[in-house]
């Protein structure tokens, strides 16, 4: 998790599950070693949260705080194969979307209501391909909407990533995010129309 002006926010779009058989028990006094997945992090204060359960059903949570003194993350599109502009609207095709028979379109519009937005951490945007490709266009002057063709699996990761700004860790209350995920990212606010894919 990362400490932001909007409180602690989980920055990994997906939970990291240790490589450990859930049926196997670690006996008292034993050491269980694992390497947590590392992701690209910008500057700031972070908390690595590790949780588990004891044999008797009791739980345990450990938190390690650390600071990163790095350069701010800079988003750059890395999968755009075509770009078409029509006034203040940009239509983008990604390589993944073009190669997918079940490709989907996601539309972002700038100007979300600031009272409803959740703050999206740069680390989450960086790790989410659809956001990494779309946000640099949303930040351009004169662009109010971005439509992006991407692969059929993108809505799942995108829904998770856009839900994170509306969570309240470490004590998540389970609220559902507002419709269209009103989101704030650095100098912009936007909403996202994400197709409802069922698998």
Image (tube, helix red, strand yellow):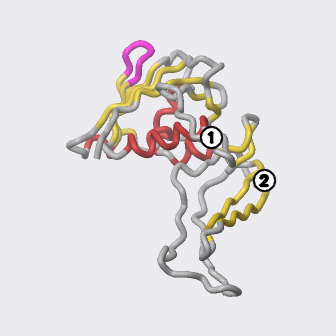
How packed mark 2 is, by other alpha carbons closer than 10 Å (few <14, some 14-19, many 20 or more), is few
| Foreground of the two, 2 or 147 | 2
Give the mark toward the camera: 2 or 1.
1
Left or right: residue 166 versus residue 91 is: right
Residue at screen point 70% across, 48% down? 2
Residue at far left of view: 101
Q: Residue 120: x percent and y percent?
A: 61, 36
For the residue labelled by badge 2, is the local secondary structure a helix, a strand or a loop? loop
Residue at screen point 49% across, 45% down? 128
**Corner quadrant of residue 105:** top left
What number is the disc on residue 173? 1
What number is the disc on residue 69? 2
Residue at far front of view: 56
For the residue labelled by badge 1, is the local secondary structure a helix, a strand or a loop? loop
108 lies above or below 171: above
Q: Residue 1: x percent and y percent?
A: 67, 51
62 lies above or below 163: below
Q: Residue 170: x percent and y percent?
A: 69, 49
Left or right: residue 100 versus residue 120 is: left
| Region rendered in magenta | 85-90
| Foreground of the two, 194 or 26 | 26
Residue at screen point 66% across, 31% down? 186
139 lies above or below 157: above
What number is the disc on residue 103? none
- Secondary structure mainly formed by the magenta segment: strand
Please give the count of numbered marks on the rendered protein. 2
């Amino acid at each position: 998790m990362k400490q932001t002006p909007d409180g602690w926010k989980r920055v990994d779009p997906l939970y990291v599950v240790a490589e450990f058989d859930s049926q196997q028990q670690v006996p008292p006094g034993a050491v269980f070693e694992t390497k947590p997945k590392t992701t690209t992090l910008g500057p700031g204060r972070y908390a690595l949260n590790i949780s588990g359960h004891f044999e008797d059903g009791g739980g345990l949570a450990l938190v390690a705080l650390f600071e990163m003194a790095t350069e701010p993350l800079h988003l750059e599109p890395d999968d755009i194969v075509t770009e078409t502009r029509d006034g203040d609207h940009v239509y983008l095709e990604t390589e993944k979307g073009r190669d997918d028979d079940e490709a989907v379109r996601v539309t972002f519009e700038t100007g979300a209501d600031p009272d409803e937005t959740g703050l999206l951490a740069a680390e989450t945007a960086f790790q989410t391909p659809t956001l990494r490709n779309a946000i640099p266009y949303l930040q351009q002057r004169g662009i109010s909407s971005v439509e992006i063709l991407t692969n059929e699996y993108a809505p799942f990761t995108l829904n998770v990533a856009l839900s994170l700004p509306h969570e309240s860790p470490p004590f998540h209350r389970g609220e559902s995010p507002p419709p269209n995920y009103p989101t704030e990212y650095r100098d912009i606010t936007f909403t996202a129309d994400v197709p409802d894919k069922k698998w």
